[in-house]
């Protein structure tokens, strides 16, 4: 096997649900040894999730979504509330370079396993905790979800149509972006430790991360007292800029015309119909002023084609355009994603062979090597006896006492 | 002052708006990021909004937002003298960030393989709509079109309207974060082994990386999740996420099991106290409640009752009293609300940056995350066009004023 970028890095991973689980995935996919610590007594939301499965929705090991989020990890079962859990946590802390967690702030400290405790055992530990609001401040102890970050960052306020309430995509945002930051901070901290010998504690909050994307709107309010709001698909510096209906059921193609050259290319691509020569569409400003009429005329043309044809015609002319793809499209008709191995087929012991996601950023020399996700507690014995150096007797005793479940 | 995580390293940033965020993050982590603009300035300086609502290349608030802490020099990469200067800069740099169409840098003799000869340790991070290789590699892309191709767009909006974009440039932002992550992982490897490499980021794939729940619902359940307004599907049942209240909107949702029980129980109690009809009372044990374990109709009656209750109250009441009752209501905040947040102020989240040329000081988000050991803060306003030409070309590369004048005359810088 080729050498991976993070080979040799040891991670104790308490990260759960989506935002916590993905941190370990980023690290594990690049070669870090990630031990996911979890428990039968309080299963991960991802394992408890009953969306789809191949055999039984209540089987914690039969969950394709959990698998998507937890590749390239070992799973160790440990009941953190058991009085003897401390012995195991101590061993894990001594072993680890990194501890990752995203329990509601205060939870780990309450269990006696907060940063101060772990640092006492391993002075140069790098510990990262993700949360909704951050670890400090009046709201720190509140738990939050993906939607919490979306609502409190201004992102939801800005998403939707001017005449209706805000909408959220049916996919997460902060839950996926936050772990990118947490993982990045961890790896940068590893490099910092290499140079200085010092560990550190990272406190990453979803709201704070999500706000950055809305900075232009924040500055617009501060500087101009202009309060931005929902504006559908329109943006100030492109027209047409929208999502247009195509042949078929709920098929759409997104098109964006930014420059004069693109406008000319767009007109030519749709056959230079007379309306494109009208003065009301001659400049970006005039197109913005007549955008309703413009969008209707564009839609009349797109409706005569399939979404794929529209995209290809536009792209051949050098105009940004893209089909609003379904999940079926992503899985079955996406040659570009396939080229990038967006999903690699791997065999999961319960689910069988199916596509597992690779990181969307590709290190071209030290490629990500994705392994399937573990069953709950699959590696408990391996971790205890091989990685942590427990004797067989100690392992058996802890198992029998219900610590390792 | 405390250290930052990546102080002492340098990046050359050639990106346009698709890739600004990567360099912004690295700069906050202490990397010296040199933004290389075309003579006359990056066309992205034309992106609105503008200070005083008047288009001006030095007053784009979009540019301000995503180029903090960078230094700017001007350089024409399409001229051979410009390419020579760029190679000299690469010798002293640890990272090159770029978002040109794949192949463009190669055509200038400045592609990854060519620059590797100059410095085998350097890392090139490339952020493009579809990635460096493959059938769509030359396709153009924008925030909206990559959201479409990545499967996010179709899930956003109302069923009776076209799919609608996320308001901010959310995928550009996410891709910038993913690119920074890939860059830092490559950096870690480089510092240990001496081996640099290229990091290839696809905006489409970044968008698609958010669709895991929807993907498995199609793959294993043959159901396609569509756009559904303020209703979200995560888990086995769609539940409402965005609710209207008396004076605005809030985020709240029915969560299952022990995790959701305290909030669900408290909300049900509050509905009772308001004297409203309360079908939630049918739930005998919230610890075992699961929205997927009851019928769709039953869930609808719960959600209708909750909707009526929320309409009875203002955002402020729901948030403040909700907090004391443990209900976890999050207000849908507008930018003006975000700036006033007590939570953010308590975390010292804002930094005032002066723009002396424009006679204004603006508050910016200061950090992406906090550390007890390092300070990784936004510290300096975005640069003016070529603001650091003198520092880099004269003080560092040692060019004379005659040479500078000649380069300017030839439109190289």
Image: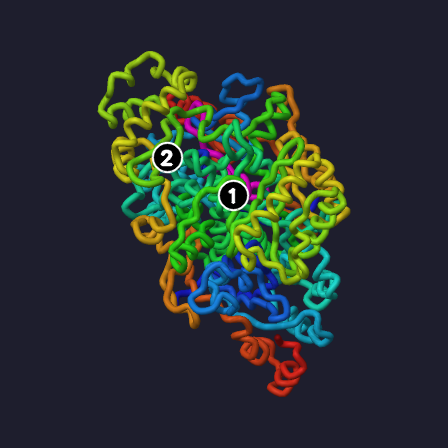
User: Label 2's element?
Assistant: strand
Image point (48%, 64%), residue name: A63
Image point (40%, 50%), residue name: B224
Specify the segment rendered in magenta.
B19-42
Q: Where is residue B364 in the image (x, y as percent from the top left)?
A: 63, 33
| Callout 2 touching callout 1 (CB < 8 Å) | no
How is this picture coloured?
Answer: rainbow
* Pick the front one: A366 or B115: A366
Image point (55%, 33%), residue name: A165
Can residue B22 be seen from the camera position used here? no
Can residue A216 be seen from the camera position used here? yes
Which residue position holds label 1?
Answer: B10
Q: Where is residue A379 in the image (x, y as percent from the top left)?
A: 53, 75
Q: Do labels 2 and 1 share a chain?
A: no
Which residue position holds label 2?
Answer: A254
Mark 1: give few (<14), some (14-19) or many (20+) Cα within 10 Å: many
Instruction: Please tell me in which quadrant of the rendered image residue A270 appears.
Output: top left
Q: Which chain carries label 2?
A: A
Instruction: Please tell me in which quadrant of the rendered image residue A9 appears.
Output: bottom right
Residue that sits furthest to the bottom in the current view: A393
Name the image quarter holding the C terminus of chain B. top left
Mark 2: give few (<14), some (14-19) or many (20+) Cα within 10 Å: many
Residue that sits furthest to the left in the current view: A271
Residue that sits furthest to the top in the current view: A279
**Is residue A188 highlighted in magenta?**
no
* Pick the front one: B270 or B94: B270
């Amino acid at each position: 096997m080729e050498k991976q970028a993070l080979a040799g890095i040891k991670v104790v991973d308490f990260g759960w649900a989506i935002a916590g689980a993905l941190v370990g995935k980023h690290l594990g996919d690049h070669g870090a040894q990630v031990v996911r610590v979890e428990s039968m007594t309080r299963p991960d939301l991802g394992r408890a999730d009953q969306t789809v499965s191949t055999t039984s929705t209540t089987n914690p090991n039969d969950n394709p979504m959990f698998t998507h989020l937890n590749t390239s990890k070992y799973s160790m079962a440990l009941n953190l509330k058991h009085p003897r859990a401390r012995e195991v946590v101590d061993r894990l802390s001594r072993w680890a370079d990194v501890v990752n967690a995203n329990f509601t702030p205060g939870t780990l400290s309450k269990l006696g396993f907060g940063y101060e405790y772990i640092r006492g055992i391993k002075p140069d530990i790098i510990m990262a905790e993700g949360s909704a609001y951050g670890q400090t401040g009046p709201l720190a102890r509140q738990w939050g979800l993906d939607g919490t970050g979306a609502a409190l960052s201004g992102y939801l306020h800005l998403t939707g149509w001017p005449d209706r309430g805000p909408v959220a995509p049916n996919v997460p945002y902060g839950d996926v972006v936050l772990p990118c930051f947490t993982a990045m901070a961890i790896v940068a901290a590893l490099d910092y430790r290499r140079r200085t010998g010092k560990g550190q504690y990272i406190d990453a909050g979803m709201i704070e991360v999500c706000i950055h994307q809305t900075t232009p709107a924040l500055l617009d309010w501060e500087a101009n007292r202009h309060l931005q709001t929902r504006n559908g698909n329109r943006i100030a510096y492109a027209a047409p800029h929208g999502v247009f209906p195509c042949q078929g059921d709920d098929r759409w193609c997104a098109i964006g015309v930014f420059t004069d050259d693109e406008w000319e290319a767009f007109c030519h691509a749709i056959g230079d119909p007379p309306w494109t020569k009208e003065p009301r569409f001659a400049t970006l400003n005039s197109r913005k002023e007549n955008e309703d009429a413009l969008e209707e005329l564009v839609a009349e043309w797109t409706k005569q084609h399939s979404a794929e044809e529209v995209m290809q015609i536009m792209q051949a002319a050098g105009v940004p355009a893209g089909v609003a793809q379904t999940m079926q499209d992503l899985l079955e008709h996406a040659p570009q994603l396939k080229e990038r191995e967006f999903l690699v087929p791997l065999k999961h012991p319960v689910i069988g062979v199916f596509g597992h996601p690779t990181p969307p950023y590709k290190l071209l020399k030290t490629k990500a090597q994705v392994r399937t996700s573990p069953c709950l507690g699959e590696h408990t014995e391996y971790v205890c006896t091989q990685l942590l150096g427990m004797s067989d007797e100690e392992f058996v005793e802890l198992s029998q006492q219900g610590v390792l479940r | 002052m405390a250290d930052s995580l990546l102080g002492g390293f340098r990046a050359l940033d050639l990106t346009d708006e698709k890739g600004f965020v990567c360099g912004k993050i690295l700069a906050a982590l202490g990397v010296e990021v040199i933004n290389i603009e075309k003579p006359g300035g990056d066309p992205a300086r034309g992106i609105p909004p503008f200070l005083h609502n008047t288009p001006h290349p030095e007053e784009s608030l979009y540019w301000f937002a995503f180029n903090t802490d960078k230094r700017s020099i001007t350089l024409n990469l399409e001229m051979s003298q410009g390419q020579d200067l760029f190679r000299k800069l690469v010798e002293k740099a640890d990272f090159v960030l770029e978002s040109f169409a794949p192949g463009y840098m190669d055509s200038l003799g400045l592609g990854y393989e060519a620059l590797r000869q100059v410095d085998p340790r350097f890392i090139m991070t490339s952020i493009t709509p579809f990635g460096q290789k493959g059938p769509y590699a030359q396709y153009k892309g924008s925030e909206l079109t990559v959201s479409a191709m990545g499967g996010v767009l179709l899930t956003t909006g109302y069923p009776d309207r076209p799919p609608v974009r996320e308001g901010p440039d959310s995928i550009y932002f996410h891709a910038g974060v993913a690119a920074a992550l890939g860059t830092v992982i490559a950096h870690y490897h480089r510092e240990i082994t001496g081996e640099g490499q290229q990091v290839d980021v696809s905006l489409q794939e970044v968008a698609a990386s958010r669709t895991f729940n929807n993907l498995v619902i199609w793959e294993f359940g043959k159901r396609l999740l569509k756009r559904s307004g303020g209703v979200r599907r995560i888990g086995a049942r769609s539940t409402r996420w965005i609710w209207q209240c008396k004076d605005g909107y809030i985020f709240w949702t029915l969560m299952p099991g022990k995790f959701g029980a305290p909030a669900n129980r408290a909300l049900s109690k509050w509905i009772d106290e308001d004297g409203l009809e309360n079908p939630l009372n049918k739930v005998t044990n919230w610890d075992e409640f699961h929205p997927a374990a009851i019928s769709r109709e039953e869930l609808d009656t719960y959600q209708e009752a909750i909707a009526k209750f929320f309409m009875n109250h203002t955002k402020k009441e729901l948030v403040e009293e909700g907090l004391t009752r443990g209900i976890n209501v999050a207000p849908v905040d507008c930018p003006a609300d975000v700036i006033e947040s007590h939570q953010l102020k308590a975390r010292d989240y804002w930094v005032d940056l002066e723009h002396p040329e424009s006679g204004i000081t603006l508050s910016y988000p200061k950090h992406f995350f906090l550390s007890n050991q390092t300070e990784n803060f936004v510290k300096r306003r975005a640069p003016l066009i070529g603001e650091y030409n003198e520092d880099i070309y004269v003080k560092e590369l040692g060019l004379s004023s005659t040479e500078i004048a000649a380069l300017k005359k030839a439109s190289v810088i």
